[in-house]
Amino acid sequence: MVVHSYIEDKETGLVRLMKSASMRLDERYDAGQIARANKLLHYFTIKHFKEEGLQEYDFVGWANQQGLLEFKQSFGAAPLNVFNYYSLPYYLKKKLNSTPTFFDTLSFSIFS
């Protein structure tokens, strides 16, 4: 129903959510059950990485959607400016896209 992938940097103590996918838009599944499964997966993931000694869990990205902000804040998340590093081709591709995005500059992190 729900899957997440992460990248972790033990040297800096940061774990970053890379991808999150679910079946929430599939009408054959109960959206509420999927939402609870997603929250539970975040909970156990955060617990695991804290036990591993990581210091920051980056939910990645900011969107002006009240429900999404409240979800992240329900874990104690707070805004955090982050820096992203891109390969030169990807950076140039992003520069050609004239639509600004907030996902590059503001993330939500917890347990710092």
Image: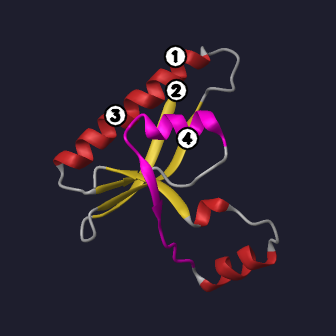
Q: Say which element carries label 4.
A: helix
Depth check: give the residue in front, 91 or 111: 111
Query: Which residue is rendered at x = 80% and y = 66% of the image?
Result: 99
Labelled pair 4, 2 in contact (Cβ < 8 Å): no
Q: Which residues are magenta?
A: 65-86
Q: Which mark is residue 1?
A: 2
Dot 4 corresponds to which residue?
A: 69
Q: Say which element carries label 3.
A: helix
Q: Residues within 10 Å of mark 4 (few under 14, many from 20)?
A: some
Q: CA distance from mark 4 to mark 2?
A: 22 Å
Q: CA distance from mark 2 to mark 1?
A: 9 Å
Labelled pair 2, 1 in contact (Cβ < 8 Å): yes
Instruction: Indicate which label's residue lies in the foreground, 2 or 1.
Output: 1
**Amino acid type of the residue tagged 2 in the rendering:** Met
Q: Residues within 10 Å of mark 3 (few under 14, many from 20)?
A: few
Name which of mark 4 and mark 2 comes first in the sequence.
Answer: 2
Query: Which x, y percent locates residue 12?
Result: 28, 70
Dot 3 corresponds to which residue?
A: 43
The answer to whether 99 appears left or right of 8 in the picture is right
